[in-house]
Structures are given as structure tokens and as C-alpha cells.
């Protein structure tokens, strides 16, 4: 076997997302044996700015990097080796990019929040970031497709940070204007935590009157506040893996410079909602519906007639309450709860499909598979692969810039 190419990783290690990207890239190197990662460059070495000297010193043949602005990108474009970027911040990237499908992220966020029965929606993004623009587009498109009126949706973008005082006041004012119950999606977990605090200041109880969803599913942020944060888990390890695959291809082709490579943009699917307390808005403001949903969550195999008896009302009456509060009936809510539990089990366990179906309340594995295909257009095995349970690999949406 030929000697592996020596490559380098230049990504932040402070955020869990980029740590997972690095682990995914290293996994590809271990599996394929075509890449060998050099010892990491130290902060003071990177700060000097002579990246070309570092490349020559360590015999580096290519890099996987996370650059978020044009100035940072320009430094890497000038190198004599191929470079792959794993950040989706630049609106017009010059380097090849491997990242998540951020329109899918926005769409999944909208679908999760809409199913809670909220009447008002807020999107909180960041200014100038491509990931934020694409998540906003997916979020707005999904709500529009569901028939949501524009009067029920507010779209705002961060001008500062999640700890900026003026930014926080804008959050409070925006949340106070929403129809209740309300739901908010922030493109970063740190912004979502600020939204939860701002919502309480605006007089909204979380999650009873305000459901909050973040993105990134960073262990530190999602468990930091007293209300655990629901968040979208991004396919970070798969992004790192596929970035390493692309780098292998570019090195093999003899790509001389990062700037000489035709721009390639790979957007990987596989984001998924990890639901926690911050989006447990059951009932759409109707206490009877909330009680029925909680009862069904504990007994996913129960028949609708059993739910009505447990709540002490006629099935027809409970059906009307569900339609008024959530916009859908008892059967649809039961299907939604079953599917959510099955998705979580498929993503987090290696249990047989029949066992997953039984625990989620399905009468058969075939029924579960049918629901999954109707909702996401995939088989249970494909869902597991998207969630990273199987070997990393496969492609995403690829576009030449």
C-alpha cells in the first residue's frame, strides 16, 4: 500500500459540533488508510499567518478547515494544496464546502413546532451567515406549505450576540407580540437559551405557552438551563467523514491550489430533532388535550376509545377539542407520537425493527415502516444510516458553484 498523504485539520475545538467534525474526518482516515493527520498546529503558529510555511514544514498535502469569513478563506485559498471547508457561513464560498442541508434543518424545525399546536412562530437567526439564511428559508417555506398565515410568523436576525443587552430586549419585544401559544426556533443553541429567558420575561411560560427549539444539540447548552433544550442534531461526524473523502479525491486528482478547484458545495441530509422539555407544549393551550396527549405518550399502543375513557369524555367531544387545539385529530396525534418514539429508538439503539415497533406502540414492523416512508421517504435502515448508526458514508446535495 502507498504511503498515506499527510493532511491537517484546522477547526475549533471549543464547540462540540466541530469536535465531531474532526472525529468524523479521522474515522475516514482510519478506515481507508489514505490519509494521515499531522499533529495539530498550535494557536500561536496559526496566528503568525504563514500557513504556507506550516504546510511545507509538515509536508501537508491537503487541509480540512472551518473558516467563517472572507478574510479567513483568502488565507487558505492562497495555499499550494487543496482545502475543504466545513463551515456554511460564507454566502459565496470560493473553497469546496461540505456541510449539512440547512434548508432541511429549517424545515424539520418548522414541522416539529407546528405539530405542537402553536399559533404564533418566531425565527431567530444571525445576520450574514449562509446557514442562517438557508434555515430561515426552509422554516418559512414549510410553514407556508402548511397554510400558516403571515400574520402568525415573525422573522428576525441577530445583530449582536446572545449576551448583548439590546439584542435581548429585542427578543423580549418580539416574543411578547406573538399569538399564544407560541413557538420559537433559533439557529444556534446559545440563542435558543436566550430566547427561553426572554420568553419568561415577556410573561410566557416555557414550554406551556412558549416552545423553544435550538440547533446544534451541544451537550453543554441543551442541559445548561433549568428547562432542558430541544435541539436539532446535525450530522457533524458524517460531514467530517465526507470532507475527508472529498479531500482524498482532490489530492488524487493533483489539485494544485484551493483556489484552482471548481467550487463544490455538498449539503448532507440527516439532521434530526432531539426533543426535550423546552418543546413539551402538549395540548395547544387546552388542558384536556394536554392530559390526553400525556396519557397517549405513556401508552402509545392504546386505542382512541381508551384515551377518551381515561379523560372522562366522549370520543367525538375529545376529537373536536383536538381539532380546535392542534389542527388535527386523535388518530393523527397518536400516529405522530408513535413515529417520534420509533425515530428516537431507531436513531439511538440497534434493536430489531420488530422490537422498536412494539415499544413505539405499532401493531407491526410493516406499519412502522409505512409511516416512516410516508413521513420521510425512507426505510428504517435508511433512517438509521442518516442518524449515523451505520457506517458513515454516502452523499448529499452536490452543486457546482
Image (cartoon, rainbow, N blue to C red):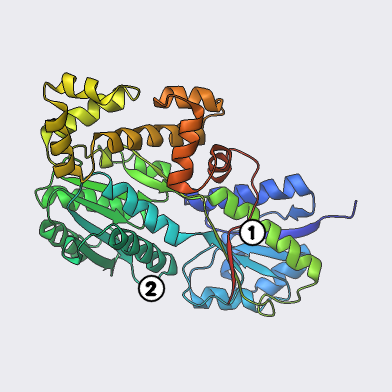
Rendered residue at 31%/42% (across/down): 229
Picture layout, residue 377 above or below residue 332: below
Q: Quadrant of residue 391?
A: top right
Instruction: Indicate the quadrant containing the C terminus: top left, top right, bottom left or bottom right.
Output: bottom right
Q: Secondary structure at mark 1?
A: helix
Judge whether residue 178 can be spotted in this image.
yes
* Residue with the most extreme front position: 316
In the rendered image, the vertical position of residue 278 relative to residue 317, given as above or below: below
Q: Position of residue 150 (x, y in %)?
A: 20, 66
Please tell me which residue lies in front, 153 or 197.
Answer: 153
Relative placement, left or right, of 324 versus 49 is left
Crowding at dot 2, Cα within 10 Å, few <14 / some 14-19 / many 20+, comes out as some
Q: Which image quarter: residue 288?
A: top left
Q: Residue furthest left?
A: 203
**Could you say which disc has been placed on residue 128 in the image?**
2
CA distance for labels 2 and 1? 24 Å
Which residue lies under the disc numbered 1?
243
Horizontally, residue 390 falls left or right of residue 302, namely right
Residue 189 visible in rendering: no
Q: Which residue: 62% across, 56% down? A: 395
Q: Please name the residue shown 56% across and 25% down the image.
A: 352
Nearest to N terminus: mark 2 or mark 1: 2
Task: Give coordinates of residue 56: x percent, y percent.
Answer: 76, 70
User: Which x, y percent locates residue 214?
Assistant: 34, 50
- Could you tell me how many numbered marks the image carries? 2
**Image marks 2 and 1: residues in contact by CB distance under 8 Å:** no
Q: Nearer the viewer, residue 77 or 142?
A: 142
Q: Secondary structure at mark 2?
A: loop
Q: Residue 314: x percent and y percent? A: 12, 25
Q: In the rendered view, would you say 346 is above or below 351?
A: below
Local crowd at mark 1 within 10 Å, few (<14), some, or many (≥20)?
many
Amino acid at each position: 500500500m502507498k504511503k498515506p498523504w499527510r493532511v491537517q485539520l484546522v477547526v475549533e475545538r471549543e464547540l462540540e459540533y466541530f469536535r465531531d467534525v474532526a472525529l468524523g474526518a479521522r474515522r475516514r482516515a482510519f478506515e481507508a488508510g489514505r490519509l494521515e493527520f499531522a499533529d495539530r498546529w498550535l494557536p500561536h503558529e496559526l496566528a503568525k499567518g504563514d500557513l504556507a510555511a506550516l504546510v511545507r514544514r509538515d509536508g501537508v498535502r491537503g487541509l480540512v478547515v472551518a473558516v467563517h469569513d472572507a478574510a479567513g478563506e483568502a488565507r487558505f485559498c492562497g495555499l499550494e494544496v487543496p482545502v475543504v471547508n466545513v463551515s456554511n457561513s460564507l454566502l459565496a464560498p470560493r473553497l469546496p464546502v461540505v456541510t449539512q442541508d440547512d434548508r432541511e434543518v429549517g424545515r424539520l424545525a418548522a414541522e416539529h413546532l407546528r405539530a405542537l399546536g402553536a399559533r404564533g412562530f418566531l425565527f431567530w437567526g444571525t445576520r450574514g451567515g449562509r446557514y442562517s439564511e438557508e434555515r430561515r428559508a426552509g422554516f418559512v417555506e414549510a410553514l407556508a406549505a402548511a397554510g400558516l398565515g403571515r400574520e402568525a410568523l415573525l422573522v428576525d436576525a441577530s445583530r449582536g450576540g446572545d449576551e448583548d443587552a439590546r439584542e435581548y430586549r429585542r427578543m423580549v419585544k418580539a416574543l411578547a407580540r406573538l399569538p399564544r401559544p407560541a413557538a420559537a426556533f433559533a439557529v444556534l443553541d446559545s440563542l435558543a437559551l436566550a430566547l427561553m429567558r426572554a420568553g419568561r420575561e415577556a410573561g410566557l411560560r416555557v414550554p406551556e405557552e412558549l416552545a423553544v427549539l435550538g440547533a446544534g444539540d451541544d451537550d453543554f447548552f441543551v442541559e445548561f438551563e433549568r428547562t432542558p433544550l430541544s435541539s436539532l442534531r446535525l450530522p457533524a461526524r458524517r460531514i467530517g467523514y465526507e470532507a475527508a473523502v472529498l479531500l482524498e479525491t482532490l489530492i488524487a486528482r493533483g489539485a494544485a491550489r484551493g483556489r484552482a478547484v471548481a467550487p463544490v458545495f455538498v449539503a448532507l441530509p440527516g439532521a434530526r430533532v432531539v426533543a426535550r422539555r423546552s418543546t413539551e407544549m402538549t395540548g395547544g393551550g387546552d388542558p384536556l388535550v394536554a392530559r390526553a396527549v400525556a396519557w397517549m405518550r405513556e401508552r402509545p399502543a392504546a386505542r382512541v376509545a381508551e384515551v377518551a375513557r381515561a379523560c372522562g369524555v366522549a370520543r367525538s367531544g375529545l376529537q373536536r377539542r383536538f381539532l380546535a387545539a392542534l389542527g388535527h385529530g386523535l388518530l393523527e396525534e397518536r400516529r405522530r407520537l408513535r413515529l417520534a418514539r420509533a425515530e428516537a429508538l431507531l436513531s439511538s439503539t440497534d434493536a430489531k425493527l420488530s422490537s422498536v415497533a412494539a415499544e413505539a406502540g405499532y401493531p407491526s414492523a410493516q406499519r412502522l415502516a409505512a409511516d416512516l416512508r410516508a413521513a420521510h421517504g425512507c426505510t428504517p435502515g435508511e433512517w438509521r444510516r442518516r442518524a449515523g448508526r451505520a457506517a458513515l458514508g454516502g452523499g448529499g446535495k452536490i452543486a457546482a458553484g
